[in-house]
Amino acid sequence: MQITNNLNKDIIEAPDWFHKAIQDKPEDKILADPLGNVSYSKWVSKNTNQNLIILIHGTGAHKKWWDPIAPQLKDVGNIIAIDLPGMGCSDFREKYRIKDFGECVISIIKKEISDHNIKKVCIIGHSLGGHVAGYVASERKDLITDLVIIDTFIRPPGYDPSQHKGGPLRMIKYYPDKETILNRFRLMPKQECQNDWYVRYIAEHSIKKTKNGWRWRFDDVLFTSLERLFDYKFSFTCPALFVHGSESLLTNGHILENIKNTYSDIMDFFEVLEAYHHVPLDKPIEIVKIIKERFD
């Protein structure tokens, strides 16, 4: 795809369902938090308010990664997509911890339960979002009734945190114009994606203009300072499904084997063929189907 400044022109070849979905605009909401406000979007169900679906993105991503998927779930419940702290439109923070991310998600869920007669809460996380979702489902078994983790690299028991190298501190990089930064957008880890219109859409919402130029919508400190869930084992008791791409670099071979050995007693596994790490981008219709089946 030749990328220009014109999003509508660049994605003109996208399928009808995609255009229909991104035109279904959600309500933009804010969770006030003393550590930094959290931005999220909400799509209201056309049928029932008794089911709630929570969508959580991966590292360096944002809530709008779910825009093409969330509206297709409105027939089964209300949907919320969250900008994790330090990403998207949420505030930057002095420190980043997955446990704090989880507390933000819990606060949003509790508010929804208080405001509506919620009977079922399904929490779905991709990559880093899977860690957050698994943590929330483990810590608040009273709130979560269903869990879907998508292609999350879950480290094996006994993993030595000292082996996890965050790399050198990322310096904030500014780009002179919109077209330049859009052409620098890459999926990480690097992978092919046949749905280039989907990638172009999320790239559009991954950038912002500042007085110093164009930059990415995430705090660069995240990549070196995030406190992960080392020495933590998920203990959720709700029905759970681990979805992984057949071509993923993060959940293949011994990595997937370790995850299955550790969690096959509390979680089912499903492989999406011809999908890499970013399964929702590679196979969005399949992801919609998988989520809807959780409500059958």
Image (cartoon, rainbow, N blue to C red):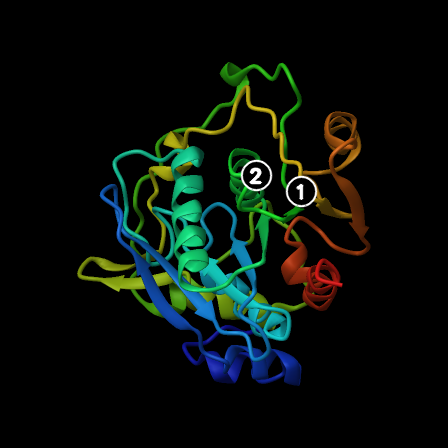
- Determine which residue is flagged by label 1: 238
Residue found 40% across the figure and 40% down from its top: 103
Q: Residue 239: where, in percent of width, then height?
A: 71, 45
For the residue marked with disc 2, what is the amino acid? Lys
Residue found 67% across the figure and 42% down from its top: 238
Q: Which residue, as the protein is rendered here, is positioned at the far front?
A: 117
The reply, left or right, for residue 221 in relation to residue 42 is: left
Q: Secondary structure at mark 1?
A: loop
- Where residue 185 is drawn, which disc sits there? none
At label 1, counting other C-alpha atoms closer than 10 Å, the crowd grade (few under 14, some 14-19, many 20 or more) is some
Q: Quadrant of the N terminus?
A: bottom right
The residue lying toward the viewer, choosing from 87 and 179, is 87
In this figure, what is the number of numbered marks? 2
Q: Is residue 183 something one can see in this rendering?
A: no
- Determine which residue is flagged by label 2: 141
Q: Residue 81: where, in percent of width, then height?
A: 48, 60
Q: Which residue, as the protein is rendered here, is positioned at the far left?
A: 211
Q: Residue 83 occupies which quadrant of the picture?
A: bottom left
Q: Are marks 2 and 1 in contact (CB under 8 Å)?
A: yes
Q: Residue 109: where, in percent of width, then height?
A: 45, 53
Q: Quadrant of the C terminus?
A: bottom right
- Whole-number angstrom distance, CA of label 2 to CA of label 1: 7 Å
**Residue 102, placed above or below residue 262:** below
Q: Residue 85: where, in percent of width, then height?
A: 36, 46
For the residue marked with disc 1, what is the amino acid? Cys
Q: Residue 221 occupies which quadrant of the picture?
A: top left
Q: Secondary structure at mark 2?
A: loop
The residue lying toward the viewer, choosing from 85 and 237, is 237
- N-terminal-most mark, 2 or 1: 2
The residue lying toward the viewer, choosing from 176 and 247, is 247
